[in-house]
Image (tube, helix red, strand yellow):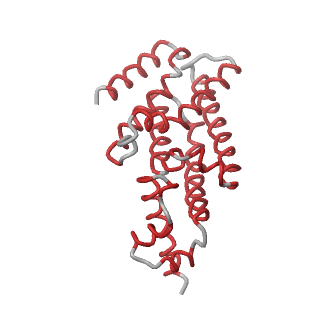
Amino acid sequence: MKKPPRRTAERILATTLDLFNRFGEPNVATTLIASDMGISPGNLFYHFPAKELLVNALFDEYLSEMNRLLPAAAEVQDVEHAWFFLHSLFELIWRHRFIYRDLNDLLSKNRHLEEQTKTVLQLKQQAFEAMLGGLQQHGLLNQSEAERRSCATHMVVVLTWWLSYEYVQNPRHALEETNAGQSALRGAQQVLGLLLPYLSELPKAQLQALIQVYSDR
């Protein structure tokens, strides 16, 4: 008896995520979500009595996926693995791009996101420090502890605000679904480019080759 409500709630979240990503969370009312689904506003209200609850549920899904992905940072052993890891991160961010597109607005009015976003930043920082430490242990780069922390912070900043940069560059089309692949590639290229000054000769050449290959696509 409980399965239909659960399926409806999942459909509501999927529709909401799509609309938020397309139009931005501030521009999507619950009535639009209900209309897009072909259900009554009352049916939507039964599952999610406030728009903020929709935002929170989607953010929690994103955080859960991020928590599953970030531990892979400690397993990165070479630049190709690092590239794949970064690309996976950007794909995850793209699937929840409304968060990053409207981050300042969301944080100003949502206490849950305000608290959890700080946690996400800390997790990203720890993950990148672990990745850099692993690369150093495998002899691929050379950083002091202070340089590692600083580099990890720079990587977090670029990762977190890359879509904002893309949006400013092309407000009308940057966040359209057709741009997903190229946006992820450009973001991964910029984050990993921060490693170039610290890489030893061979992995540096490998990373430069990767960047060139994907830049030509």
Q: State the quadrant of the C terminus.
A: top left
x, y percent for residue 202: 45, 15
Quadrant in the rendering for residue 179 = top left
16 or 27, which is in the foreground? 27
Depicted 8 relative to depicted 180: above or below: below
Residue at the left extreme, as displayed: 217
Residue at the top extreme, as displayed: 201
Is residue 17 shown left or right of residue 45?
Answer: left
Is residue 206 shown left or right of residue 76?
Answer: left
Residue at 49%, 76% in the rendered image: 41
Quadrant in the rendering for residue 154 = top right
Is residue 183 shown left or right of residue 150?
Answer: left
Q: How many marks?
A: 0
Depicted 112 relative to depicted 190: above or below: below
212 or 77, which is in the foreground? 212
x, y percent for residue 168: 45, 35
